[in-house]
Amino acid sequence: MKLTDSIFQDADEARAFMERERWPHGPVCPHCGNVDRAKITELQGAKHRAGLYQCAECREQFTVTVGTVYERSKIPLNKWLAAIFLMNAGKKGTSAHQIHRMIGVTYKTAWFMCHRIRESMRQEGLEPMGGGGKIVEADETYYGKPDKPRVSPRRVKEGRPYIKGDKNRNNRPVLALVERGGRVRSFHVPVADAASVAQIVRDNIHRETRLHTDESRLYPVVGKEFAKHETVNHSAKEYARGDVTTNTVETYFSVFKRGMRGTYQHCKEKHLHRYLAEFDFRFNHRAALGFTDGERAAIAIRNSGGKRLTYRPSH
């Protein structure tokens, strides 16, 4: 897939491409799950729009966008494909302003499109990382100010005012777990304390894994639950000792921060988890693992099923 391909110029070809990616063995009814091609009919004629199907099992009509993040969108599918490709082609992302200029939609429309595409990039049904003989690196970083400054419960209890100190004390914490040579999972946590970090590590890493961290006091207790917990001392300028290092997770944080500061520049805290899902997706399908820009975009399309993001107020 290249940006010069006809699927980016013609809405019908874009729809056909999306059908091939989402339904490689033929149409699937999103309402009842029917996969029997003999019981699914493509409705044709002047009264029906292209790509409309009807299921004989449930009598419902559907298109390739029903049950996906693209459902009920009036944006032509070729523009959707262009936006998906652009967001997967840039290592540090592509801003909504850039997409609005390149594909000819309003900035508001491009912003909604980007968030829906991020939702399609979100990982689901994940197995524990690592395993026997494998290494998982864990580390935390801080990015951006929270919408509401956090005051320590201890200060509230003792009636002491908040005092500015550590530059990271009132920033948004992000925890990342990276399997050496493999995939990443990142999490925005309200507070990066030992309890919350330990719970995420327990839930996402196989117990037979070698856990690599820095000298942070968040990991010694939970580290005892794994095959081995090894650390490097960054405060003493130790960044690697044999194969013990956190350089892989630090590399992920470097790309994430460069993208957020240089490309996106600002995001509200309530949206931070969506940006993390985007950076996770590109890292997990990076060129070093054999993926191309077009393959990343195709995987995002296949992952769009069963996800909705409307931003409509509840009634």
Image (cartoon, grey):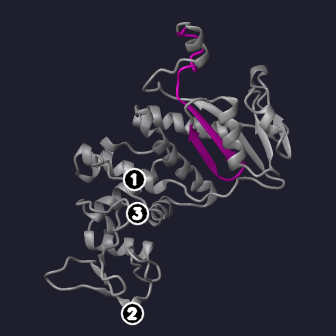
What residue is drawn where x is 39% and y is 78%? 29
Q: What residue is shown with label 2?
A: 38
Residue drawn at 37 percent across, 59 percent down = 69
The x and y percentages for residue 227 are 86, 47
- Which amino acid type is shown beneath numbered disc 3? Lys
Q: Which residue is mark 1?
A: 86
Q: Which mark's residue is nearer the viewer, 1 or 3?
A: 1
Queried whether the magenta region covers residue 215, the answer comes back as: no
Residue 177 lies, in percent from the top left, at: 66, 43
Q: Which mark is residue 2?
A: 3
Instruction: Say left or right for 99 vs 20.
Output: left
Numbered range of the magenta stretch: 162-188
Q: Residues within 10 Å of mark 3 (few under 14, many from 20)?
A: few
Location of residue 22 by image quarter: bottom left
Q: Is residue 201 above or below residue 241?
A: below
Tag 1 near tag 3, CB within 8 Å: no
Instruction: Determine the CA span between mark 3 and mark 2.
Output: 34 Å
Q: At x 47% / y 43%, what residue is drawn?
A: 275
Q: Position of residue 228 (x, y in %)?
A: 86, 43
Under mark 2, the amino acid is Ala
Q: What is the three-letter code of the residue carrying label 1? A: Leu
Q: Residue furthest bottom?
A: 38
The tag earlier along the polypeptide, 1 or 2, is: 2
Label 1 residue SS: helix
Tell whether 155 sits left or right of 225.
left
155 relative to 77 in the view: left or right: right
- For mark 2, give the secondary structure: helix
Picture coordinates of residue 165, whole percent (x, y): 58, 11
Does the magenta portion include 165?
yes
